[in-house]
Amino acid sequence: MTSRTERFERKPRSPQKNEEPVEVIRFSPEEEASLLSESNAQKTSANELFVKSEYKDAIDVYGQALSTCPNYLDYEIAVLKSNVAACHLKLEDWKEAIKAATAAIDGLDKLKEKGEEGEKPQEEEEADEEIISAGAAKAEDVSVKGQREKDIERIRGKALMRRARARSEQGGWASLSGAEEDYKLLEKMDNLSAADRKLVRQQLLKLPPRTKAAQEKEMGDMMGKLKDLGNGILKPFGLSTENFNMVKDEKTGGYSMNFNQGGPS
């Protein structure tokens, strides 16, 4: 029976959320390896379901993999979340795709900020003693770190592509603006495939007019609702919003409100 070391930590609470902080359970190296192996097996099963276009079942199995994976392994969790986003894209569930992709990106950004491979278990087995030159050891560390950074950027690129597409498909001023921001981030990445880079350039040309049109529509709808509200308030006084005109001062750029008893002429 493997030994288990548990340690509970409080993760910082997001100021935008009211849920309780997540408890981080630390496992011994042996149990962590066992849980990760089980989670990877579940991920493989979910990948197979995805290939078969059984996206809802794949989401369920990815969920099992997430439940099994130690919740301090940010990179592994980000990969699973990104895969969940891919499933929701196939199902055209744009809202859930955005949610899953954002969770993946947030996890990877956290790893990038740390500048390390991720959090380590509280207790680790000591490595077998062997003679390694200082130069060789440093070269090996740099190589491992470099590969890890490439892996993080690769998954980050996938998650950004998925979120950008979901935002673009969902539509609306806020979502389209978000899609533009995602594609601008992708444009700066140097690890995209030629096909993805072409798609990014195309979307950066198509999105601005769509975003502007959505903005104008939503602003128009909002002004219409405000006008209806104003008319409801003014009606008992025998007035309406038509009795008020906004006049721009060309010298100052400010506006003043003029009252017209008879309404528009």
Image (cartoon, rainbow, N blue to C red):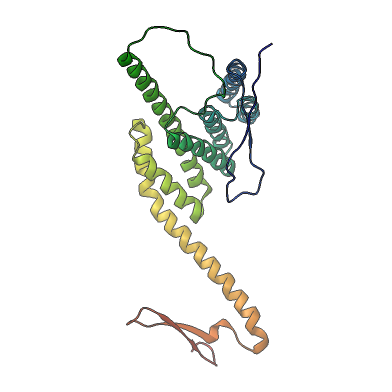
Estimate the x, y position of residue 97 in percent, counting from the top left.
56, 39
Q: Looking at the rendering, which quadrant does residue 43 occupy?
A: top right
In what quadrant of the picture does the N terminus appear?
A: top right
Which residue corresponds to the image point at 50% horizontal and 39% vertical from the top-left? 106
- In this view, the residue in front, 221 or 44, is 44
Estimate the x, y position of residue 31 in percent, counting from the top left.
62, 17
Does 265 sit above or below residue 38? below
> Residue most toward the bottom?
261
- In this view, the residue in front, 239 or 121, is 121
Does 164 sit above or below residue 31? below
Left or right of residue 244, residue 8 in this image = right
Left or right of residue 206, residue 101 in this image = right
Q: Looking at the rendering, which quadrant does residue 254 occupy?
A: bottom left
Does 101 sit above or below residue 180? above
- In this view, the residue in front, 198 or 121, is 121
Estimate the x, y position of residue 246 in percent, counting from the top left.
46, 82
Estimate the x, y position of residue 245 in percent, counting from the top left.
48, 84
- In this view, the residue in front, 93 or 264, is 93
Which residue corresponds to the image point at 64% horizontal and 89% vertical from the top-left? 238
Q: How many marks?
A: 0
Which residue corresponds to the image point at 57% horizontal and 75% vertical from the top-left? 227
Q: Looking at the rendering, which quadrant does residue 198 occupy?
A: top left
